Image (cartoon, rainbow, N blue to C red):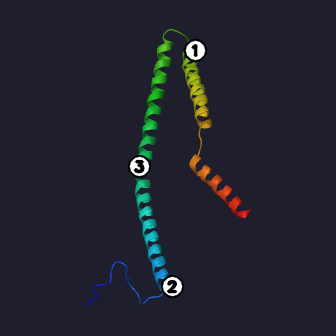
Amino acid sequence: MSDPQVDLRTEPLAPDRSLGELVSDMTESLSGIFRKEIELVKVELKEEAGKAGKGAGMLGGSALAGWSALMFLSFALAWLLDEVMHTALAFFIVAALYGIAAAVLGLRGKQELTEIDPLPETRASLKEDVQWARAQKS
């Protein structure tokens, strides 16, 4: 029987093992946990990549269908304008409309890209790490 004075919550689980053995077991357990977590991440990423690929394919198909519809509408507009003016002028007007739209979208896209601040938190953290390392060196 156990001694009633001994508090089992504070007694070591393996009193006959050395500190080195306990640290080794703990390291091995942590290593196993990390390996299992990495495997889980791999499985989840593979599943998500499959979904992203399927979605990207559908967006590509949608873009092609939209482009085709836009081309047919462009020809229809040019031929409609052809009823009231020379054919070349009608097609030139449609092309000029696309040129204006391309310029506006291009300038707007360039502006959006210049406003991108990639990984601001990571950059700040790295700067803090560099400052800490310099302080340790001094």
Mark 3 or 1: the one toward you: 3
Q: Look at label 3 and name its amino acid.
A: Lys
| Mark 3 to mark 1 CA distance (whole Å) | 43 Å
The percent position of residue 40, horizontal first and vertical second, equals: 41, 64
Camera-side residue of 73 and 44: 44
The outermost residue toward the top is 84
The percent position of residue 80, horizontal first and vertical second, equals: 46, 15
Camera-side residue of 26 and 111: 26
Q: Which mark is residue 20?
A: 2
Between disc 3 and disc 2, whose residue precedes?
A: 2
Q: Look at label 2 and name its amino acid.
A: Gly
Mark 1 or 2: the one toward you: 2
The quarter of the rendered structure image containing the C terminus is bottom right
Between disc 3 and disc 1, whose residue precedes?
A: 3
Label 3 crowd bin: few (<14), some (14–19), many (20+), radius 10 Å: few
Q: Quadrant of residue 44?
A: bottom left
Between disc 1 and disc 2, whose residue precedes?
A: 2
| Mark 3 to mark 2 CA distance (whole Å) | 51 Å
Q: Does 108 sit left or right of 133 as displayed?
A: left
What SS does tag 3 mark? helix
The percent position of residue 27, horizontal first and vertical second, equals: 49, 77
Label 2 crowd bin: few (<14), some (14–19), many (20+), radius 10 Å: few
Q: Which mark is residue 38?
A: none
What SS does tag 2 mark? helix
The percent position of residue 82, horizontal first and vertical second, equals: 51, 13
User: Visible in this render: residue 119?
Assistant: no
Label 1 crowd bin: few (<14), some (14–19), many (20+), radius 10 Å: few
| Residue corresponding to mark 3 | 54
